[in-house]
Image (cartoon, rainbow, N blue to C red):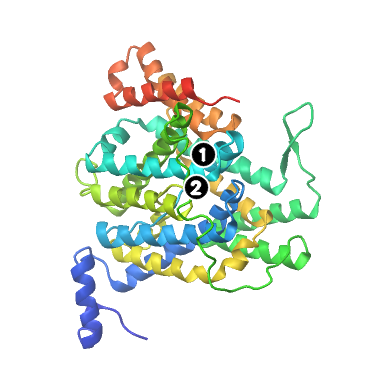
Amino acid sequence: MLDCTWSACSRHVSCFDVFSLLEQIFRVQKAGSTLRREAIAGLTTFVTMSYIVAVNPAILKSAGIPTGPSMVATIATTIFGTLLMGLYANRPFAIAPYMGENAFIAFTVVKALGYSWQAALAAVFLAGVLFLLLTLFRLRQWLVEAIPGALRHSFAVGIGLFLTFVGLNETGIVRSSSGGAPLQAGHLTAAPVLLAIGGFLLMAVLMIRRFHAAILTGILATTVIAFVAGIAAPPTKWISFPPSLGPIAFHLDFSHALSWKFFPIVLTIFVMAFVDTMGTLIGVSARAGFLDEHGNLPEIGRPMLADAFSTIFASLAGTSTSGAFIESATGVEAGGRTGLTAVVVAICFAGTLLFSPFIAAIPAQAYGPALIIVGLLMLAPITRIRFDDYTELVPAFAVIALMSFTYNIGIGITAGFVLYPLCKAVGGRWTEVKPGLWLLAGLSLLFFVFYPYA
């Protein structure tokens, strides 16, 4: 076995040359890391976030985007963004299509509002261009820093409950009612529902046992059981060359772009994405020790540019908004400190391109429990909301409740932007509201004025 340490590699000219190149590009030794540690960190991040290859196409399928090309778009976007993050920003963060934004595209923009998925991709593109311009002019960070912690935490919790409901509904554990109560329990003794419950419990047990690949293992095991039990049809072949991106790539519909009714959609995608990105960058960087004495991430413009370009690429490829993935924290915990970790993640995702027939055949009973688990994980920030301060609690509660009960993430976010400064003003604490939030509040009022109500 090759001993990939600096002292050992000095005895092997070819290996030493590789290390010299890697040190020049990533400054591995300066970051206090090693090649082995960076590789392990990259594998760890890949394993913990690889569920996105199956779950993202499954969600976007509800918008009418074909699963095979959608899977390729998901992987291509992940590879592009993560390589950009690693090679340009030199940070150990992976980039992939966001959970939450994909649900907004599928269930709100397309299913609830009636827009085509092509129009939704145009909104993602416009939001990406807006990201890019704001990043270049250094305004994006100004806006994000204006969003108070209570709202940031409530966004995560609300999206988590939203994804949980999607998972419960997709698996049949919960279903809509024809009369009386709006919802009711599904047929909990039916084989498909029992399998979904079993998949959830398997993922939960693996997580309790601190197994890094809990979600992916649960998806794979539940899928195999579904095939064997006849609950879902297995693929006719397991490995093939990846399907063409032709059916979805560059299929953007800008015909609604200048409509005021379309404005709330672009605004929501923009707000969701930049909040997610900043939260991930700051949170994971804090754990990695990247922040300076003022709590800021040095050269933050580089990872933010990688995020902006990734979102533009995602829309052109045919998938939803992309950005820094919170699962990057697992790689940081494993010791990843440079962009080499991200490059390893990208290489691993490239290997998944050959398994499109299997991924397209994964049933709801397998990916639905993953959505529920992701929702569970996103509840953690609720403990950081101040329940003894009603100027913080009321807007946070409105965000969570409206996201969950209106089946619309955008309404929850914009309601929070309006209510937070209002509550602070009523409480005589309007000075706690930063100028950027007043701007977002004004945009959010426009959201409600021009929202295309059914």
Give x and y (percent) for residue 395: 45, 24
Q: Is disc 1 placed on a helix, strand or loop? A: helix
Question: Pointer 1 and pointer 2: residues touching (CB < 8 Å)?
Answer: yes
Q: Which residue is mark 1?
A: 159
- Visible in this render: residue 217? yes
Q: Is residue 280 above or below residue 443?
A: below
10 Å crowding of disc 1: few (<14), some (14-19), many (20+): many
Please give the name of the residue rendered at 59% of the width and 55% of the height, measured from the top-left corner. Answer: 66
On the picture, is 347 further left or further right than 291? Answer: right
Q: Is residue 239 above or below residue 71?
A: below
Give x and y (percent) for residue 318: 48, 53
- Label disc, if present, on residue 99 of the rendered structure: 2
From the viewer's side, name the closer residue of 134 and 389: 134
- Visible in this render: residue 378? no
Compare marks 1 and 2 and give the one earlier in the sequence. 2
- The amino acid type found where label 2 is placed reads Met
